[in-house]
Image (tube, rainbow, N blue to C red):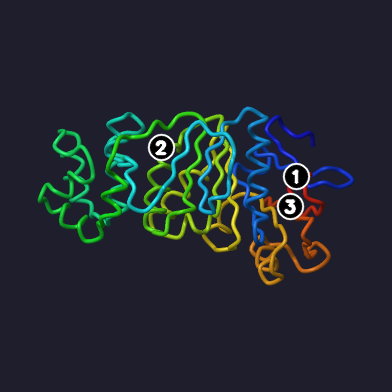
Amino acid sequence: MRPSKIAVKVLEGEEPIFYDPIYHGRTLKIFGMDDYPVRFMKYLVAEYRRIGYSPIVFDTTGTVEGEFDTIIEVRDGENLGLDPIKLYKAGYFDPYTAVTIVQTLYGLDRSLTDRLYVDVLLGKVSSVPEAVKRGEKYSEVILESYTPLDEAFYTGDVPELKGSVLVDLGETHSITLVGIAFLTLAAVFEKRRETFVGLTDGAVLSYTTAGSAALPLLTRPLRRRVTAISSQYAVDSLLNVSGPVLLLYHDPDVQSLVYESSGVPPGPTRKFITKSSGAYILRSPETIDVFHGELPEGVS
């Protein structure tokens, strides 16, 4: 089968092996030890830039580099202006999305969410800090888990979020802030087209309730969008995402887990992966295919 225009080579061999989002699924999962997942993510960013797709990368490792139109450096206690209500006011999404994000972050029930939604629509609340200070029932619930780090995160002018974007989470020590940033920005980029979305490390990004809510926004199938999730950790939240798997060098037990979760039967197809090679696993209703080969130049 001839690869489509948005297919990229993932393995070298007698015949190169391609990941083709049109035929294989819009999300590629990459599991590997040490820096192998990050190295492969950098390779994919470069390949999709060449195709004309604008990259949006969430990086918890702080090692993804390159030219981006916008770089958001999430640091504990710094003012970033990434307030979902402010982002609605700036036109990045609708008011219902903004209030739903606040609901997810702070555990509001249905009635309190509706009350906040009305206050946002009426212009009584124009930011999360204002919602906290209103003295309403929803204010009390938000305050139960609201911290000074949250306040700083929401404070400041809304950044311009156009073109290619790198969200650098490598210096953030608060896993809560990682979840808030991931969910809020995932909602901003949810419907972005002609885009390659990279999530590194996906397990860290999806660790919190907010992160788990964000993951489906960027992995659901969408035309003219490709998502890649790289991780050292083969956790259920990532293994259960629909799409092919690229297995890189890893601990033997983890390699076995990835094969088993993909439905690969015991036998020759469960080849151990060395440092310079990988296994590309495709599932369909009828078959499970595993292709082995060497990593592309620039990755190994």
SS label for mark 3: strand
SS label for mark 1: loop
Quarter of image, res 8: top right
Q: Which label lies toward us, 3 or 2?
A: 2
Quarter of image, res 4: top right
Q: Is residue 277 left or right of residue 79?
A: right
Which mark, residue 298?
1
| Residue 4 visible in rendering | yes
User: Which numbered disc flags the more N-terminal residue, 2 or 1?
Assistant: 2
Q: Is residue 156 left or right of residue 197?
A: left
Judging depth in this view, the residue of 194 and 1 nearest the camera is 194
Residue 157 versus residue 131 in the image, above or below: above
User: Label 2 belongs to which residue?
Assistant: 188
User: Which numbered disc flags the more N-terminal residue, 1 or 3?
Assistant: 3
Q: Residues within 10 Å of mark 3 (few under 14, many from 20)?
A: many
Instruction: Check disc 3 and give the amino acid type.
Output: Tyr
